[in-house]
Image (tube, rainbow, N blue to C red):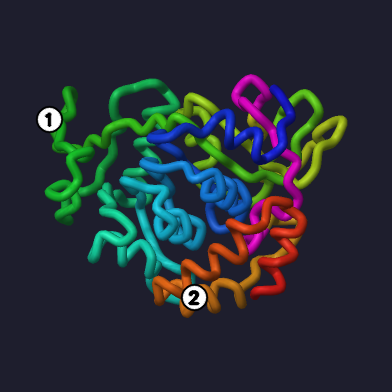
Amino acid sequence: MPLMTLDEAIGTLVHEGDCVALEGFTHLIPFAAGHEIIRQRRRNLHLVRMTPDLIYDQMIGMGCARALSFSWGGNPGVGSLHRLRDAVENQWPQPLKLCEHSHAGLAAAYCAGAARLPFGVLRGYLDNDLAGHNPAVRRVACPFTGRQLAAVAAINPDVTILHAQTADRRGNVAIHGIVGAAREAALAAGRVIVTVEEIVDELAPAMNAIVLPHWVVTATVLCRGGAYPSYAQGHYQRDNAFYQRWDQISRDRAVFSDWMRQHVLQTRDHRAHLDGLRAAA
């Protein structure tokens, strides 16, 4: 497991046209990695995420995405993702293909991908019309009972990117707190990048934590504050003011573009970038 800088990891492991999952449920959202993808102008990406929020709004608005597989999209506690909505309704800055799931459906797709199975099965999608709009959802009959079930096509990202609290020097990664689908998204992927708050000699035992073994992780990046403005349990809190302010920034194309140019594109050093984002909030 190599230790890389953020620009090296994105430059080496994220390619034009890739299927890319940036996971992290409520906290540990890999904002810094998403911003580096924007700076390196990766295009034609198929983005996957259980809850696309501000980082995907930014990536979509900056023209990184051709498709989005997701299970909920919005600015948590505030409202719509205006860049996502503009791409769907007005094809700006380019058309965006949607593949909408429930949380359970997308989790099943990740689990199937992690197990290298062609699809996942669940009781769901039977009382709504998502299957009529999503070709990745089909009906199957249970071979034992004949009962109708939903099948969801497996998702195997080319790259999964996570943020975590800690890695050790061998490359094992510990994730504490709300885990979401981080483990499944990592195991389903062809390549895995993990940005972390700290690197230690040994991982300490902890309750409510998972460990990704070093052979799962392609590259580790020391990136303190890499989840800001989301939170990293045990390190810093969520910046709610930033989420609230984003609603106004993202409503207007010109305001959004100017903000991204000033606070993302023009800042290469991560520490300076992080300081600028906090000041902007």
Report the front residue among 25 and 57: 57
Which residue type does callout 2 highlight?
A: Ile
Q: Mark 1 points at which residue?
A: 146
Task: Return the x and y of residue 34 as percentages of the image width and height.
Answer: 55, 49
Q: Name the residue under label 2.
A: 249
Report the front residue among 126 and 90: 90
**Residue 83 seen in the figure:** yes
Task: Return the x and y of residue 89 as percentages of the image width and height.
Answer: 23, 65
Q: Residue at x 69, y 22 (%)?
A: 1
> Which of the two marks, 2 or 1, is nearer to us in this view?
2
Dot 1: element:
loop
- In the picture, measured across the screen, residue 109 lies left or right of residue 25, that is left
- The correct choice, above or below, for 165 with respect to 279 in the image is above
Magenta residues span: 213-231
- In the picture, measured across the screen, residue 187 lies left or right of residue 83, that is right
- The correct choice, above or below, for 172 with respect to 254 in the image is above
- The correct choice, above or below, for 154 with respect to 81 in the image is above
Choose top left, top right, bottom left or bottom right for residue 90: bottom left
Task: Return the x and y of residue 231 as percentages of the image width and height.
Answer: 66, 60
